[in-house]
Image (cartoon, grey):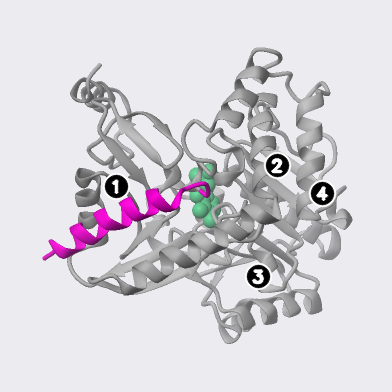
Amino acid sequence: MNSEEIKQLDKGSFLPTYGRFDVALCSGKNATARDCEGKEYIDFGSGIGVNSLGWADEAWAQAVSRQAATLQHTSNLYYNPVSGSFAAELLRVSGYGGVFLGNSGAEANECAIKLARKHGVEQGGDDHCEILTLQNSFHGRTVTTLAATGQDVFHHYFFPFTGGFVYAEPNMESVRAHVTEHTCAVMIEFVQGEGGVLPLDKSFVQDLSALCRERGMLLIADEVQTGVGRTGTFYCWEQYGVRPDILTSAKGLGGGLPIGACLCTAELRDVLGAGMHGSTFGANPVVCAGAAEVLRRVSRPEFLAEVREKGVYLRERLEKMEGIAEVRGLGMMLGAVPEKSTAAALASACVKEGLLILTAKTALRLLPPLTITREEMDKGLAILERVLAQAE
Ligand SMILES: *Cc1c(COP(=O)(O)O)cnc(C)c1O
């Protein structure tokens, strides 16, 4: 099949929920993808921060295919050796006390919300269930995680939304004005990804964490995008000096297969009892076999040090680049605001020139595979430079 045939089949079949770039990808190696005609693309997106080990990583692909040929699914009614050891290893690496595994970021956040509410109700009664989130946040596409998302544009059409969410500006004055006796938890992204790659202020996060402790509210970190090495530490909280009670992780965790994890402290481990939550596909052994390889590689201190170095290199190159007004973000999660044209138009132009790059609001967004090489970065940056020079 050639690219045109692929596009026609796609357009005739799927609900039109996605605005796709004009390219059909057929294969790839590390941070270089190929379209179905063999043209190469440098990848600054990793899907959307998912392919943390790049395209078709050998050890990852082997782990996944071996597991698929051995035991592909058991359901959560039975034990299996792969999912349990992955979960234990994730707890060891993250320092958490318990984990629930689902299939996506939204599903991980749903679990976090249920856990926080059950805990809140147990502590303070049935109306102790409100969750404070931040303006400009993004927490997912289910009806409840849309409600948790602090952006009005997501609060249309699908009424009635789940109640019990309030939205504060990312400052303590606004947070204090929105916290009530009903608030059981606060949910934040350390770096707002979809919101434009906006890191929260460190002192704000520390004050917020102190307020949570003081008032017995749980701190939930949505690390669906910032997690698994993306920002230069395994989880981003390490850089903020606060320890969330609940942490959600997804995108990069599976290396390309669907997984979502809701981690919690040992104290919260037994809040959700048997039958209170579940997922048919959750903790799938094939997915866990791939995720175990991601975990093994990305948690190594040398690997994380390389991510930080590459992040600094990308940031410095972008800061010096003609046509970029502002660079922000952490590690290899970067936003670059262009001086001319729009992020969307520039991203489309980049694809034509052989560079896959994302956008977030008015920023170009870079989430390259964590394994990207210097050579691949340089090729991609050269394309971006050329596209920016032609921008009007
Ligand atoms: C992508 C994302 C989600 C939603 O994840 P899905 O896997 O698409 O459900 C939630 N929170 C954050 C911060 C994200 O970046």
Residue mark closest to the camera, 1 vs 3: 1
Amino acid carrying label 2: it is Arg
Q: Say which residue label 2 marks.
A: 296
Q: Position of residue 258 (x, y in %)?
A: 57, 34
Residue contact at pointers 2 and 4, CB within 8 angstroms:
no
Work out whether mark 2 precedes mark 1 in sequence or the reverse, and give the earlier one.
2
At x 71%, y 61%, the residue is 129
Q: Say which residue label 3 marks.
A: 239
Question: What stretch of residues is rendered in magenta?
Answer: 370-392
Residue mark closest to the camera, 3 vs 2: 2
Quarter of image, res 292? top right
Q: Say which residue label 4 marks.
A: 92
Residue contact at pointers 2 and 1, CB within 8 angstroms:
no
Work out whether mark 4 precedes mark 1 in sequence or the reverse, and give the earlier one.
4
At x 81%, y 55%, the residue is 95
Amino acid carrying label 3: it is Gln
- Say what secondary structure mark 3 lies in: helix
At x 84%, y 54%, the residue is 268
Quarter of image, res 69? top right
At x 60%, y 38%, the residue is 254
Horizontal arrangement in the rendering, residue 274 relative to residue 34 (left or right): right
- Say what secondary structure mark 2 lies in: helix
